[in-house]
């Protein structure tokens, strides 16, 4: 005699895990908990001087025009004043 048995397939388990992850993310977004995470990310910004040193320059300062500028957003550079990060070789 052949007995038939039922079991969960791997596909069903994977789909359930993905669905649970999506629900957790939606819960965090709609309850405001995701804001705590984004505030922590914003506080880790580099300054112009630190970025220039990482790029193997000797120093860096915010300025309006220069020959050695690095793109990006920096904590001490104000784009409203047309400032860019100027690195000193």
Image: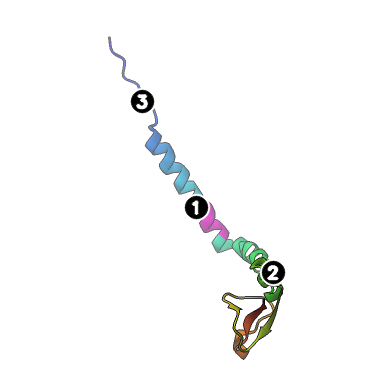
* The magenta stretch spans residue 27: yes
Which residue is at a point 64% across and 81% down the rendered structure image? 86
Q: Residue 6 carries which label?
A: 3
Residue in the picture at 70% in, 70% down: 50
Tag 2–tag 1 contact (CB < 8 Å): no
Residue 55 in view, yes or no: yes
Q: Nearer the viewer, residue 81 or 52?
A: 52
Return the disc, 1 or 3, that comes first in the chain's sequence. 3
Tag 2 secondary structure:
helix
Residue at point 68%, 66% (across, down): 44
Mark number, residue 53: 2
**Helix, strand or loop at disc 3?**
loop
Give the quadrant of residue 33.
Answer: bottom right
Asked whether 41 or 30 is in front, the reply is: 41
Label 2, residues with CA under 10 Å away: few <14, some 14-19, many ≥20: some
Whole-angstrom CA distance, mark 2 to mark 1, is: 42 Å
Q: Earlier in the sequence, mark 3 or mark 2?
A: 3
State whether the magenta stretch is mostly helix, strand or loop: helix
Quadrant of the image for the N terminus? top left
Instruction: Give the quarter of the image for residue 75.
Output: bottom right
Residue 46 visible in the snapshot? no
Label 1: state its secondary structure: helix
The magenta stretch is 24-28
Viewer-proximal residue among 15 and 66: 66
The residue drawn where x is 63% and y is 61% is: 37
Image: 67 above or below 13: below
Horizontally, residue 72 falls left or right of residue 51, namely left
The residue pinned by badge 1 equals 23
């Amino acid at each position: 005699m052949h007995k038939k048995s039922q079991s969960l397939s791997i596909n069903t388990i994977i789909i359930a895990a993905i669905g649970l992850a999506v629900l957790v993310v939606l819960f965090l977004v709609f309850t405001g908990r995701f804001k705590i995470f984004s505030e922590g990310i914003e506080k880790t910004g580099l300054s112009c001087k630190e970025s220039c040193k990482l790029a193997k320059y000797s120093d860096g300062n915010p300025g309006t025009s220069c020959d050695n500028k690095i793109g990006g957003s920096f904590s001490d550079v104000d784009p409203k004043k047309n400032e860019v990060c100027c690195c000193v070789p």
